[in-house]
Image (cartoon, helix red, strand yellow):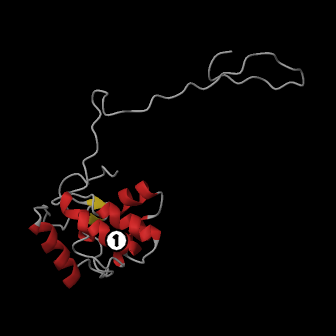
Amino acid sequence: MAVGMKRKRTDEAVDAPVPVPQKSVKATSKRPGLKKPPPIPEDMEAQLQRIAASDRTAFEKKVWNLLCQIPRGQVSTYGLLSAHLSSSPRAVGNALRRNPFAPEVPCHRVVATNKTLGGFKGKWPKDGEGITIDEKRKLLRGEGVKIDEKGRVLGTPWAAFV
């Protein structure tokens, strides 16, 4: 029987062989064109220890650990973090809002999917501006992140989570 064709169901027994799925070959860094994910920056080791020692929820710790992987001068999105965690962007945002280690654990490096700055420190002003957004903008620009005149981050969001 050809692959992808459906067989009409009958009450008769059919002795046709059942196709067995082939084992997939795992991608390794030895194969050409595949890159190994970048390591977590060394300056984040102390932050990872602080997160691990905290009495916060396992989910919050997972989110904050991912923040430590985003390199200085880069941003990621709530959507990318949530996809990596099989969660929702809102749940990620709530964990970021409760980050007691900011800005050392860099929740300011997470922006909305449309690359606008989003919220910061749990505040989402109606017009997208305010003292907390100004602080987020200042932190990002201090790291070399480019922001256009409409308040959108330039460049591709970072997604190489381990």
Rendered view: 108 above or below 72: below
Specify whether 89 is left or right of 133.
right
Percent across and percent down for residue 50 are: 31, 72
Percent across and percent down for residue 133 are: 21, 77
Specify whether 59 is left or right of 44.
right
Rendered view: 107 above or below 114: below
Rendered view: 23 above or below 42: above
Q: Viewer-proximal residue, 22 or 75?
A: 22
Specify whether 144 is left or right of 68.
left
Label 1 CA crowd tier, 10 Å (few <14, some 14–19, many 20+): many
Extreme residue toward the bottom, this view: 131
Q: Viewer-proximal residue, 57 or 16?
A: 57
Q: Quadrant of residue 49?
A: bottom left
Question: Could you tell me which residue is drawn at 18 percent across and 62 percent down?
Answer: 43
Q: Quadrant of residue 141?
A: bottom left
Q: Is residue 109 visible?
A: no
| Residue underneath mark 1 | 51
Q: Is residue 159 visible?
A: yes
Give, as a three-letter code, the residue at label 1. Answer: Ile
Q: Viewer-proximal residue, 68 or 113?
A: 68
In the picture, the quarter occupied by the N terminus is top right
Question: Could you tell me which residue is drawn at 29 percent across and 80 percent down?
Answer: 121
Q: Viewer-proximal residue, 160 or 83?
A: 160
Percent across and percent down for residue 132 are: 22, 81
Extreme residue toward the right, this view: 11
Question: Of helix, strand and loop, which one carries label 1?
Answer: helix
Percent across and percent down for residue 77 are: 31, 60
Specify whether 86 is left or right of 48.
right
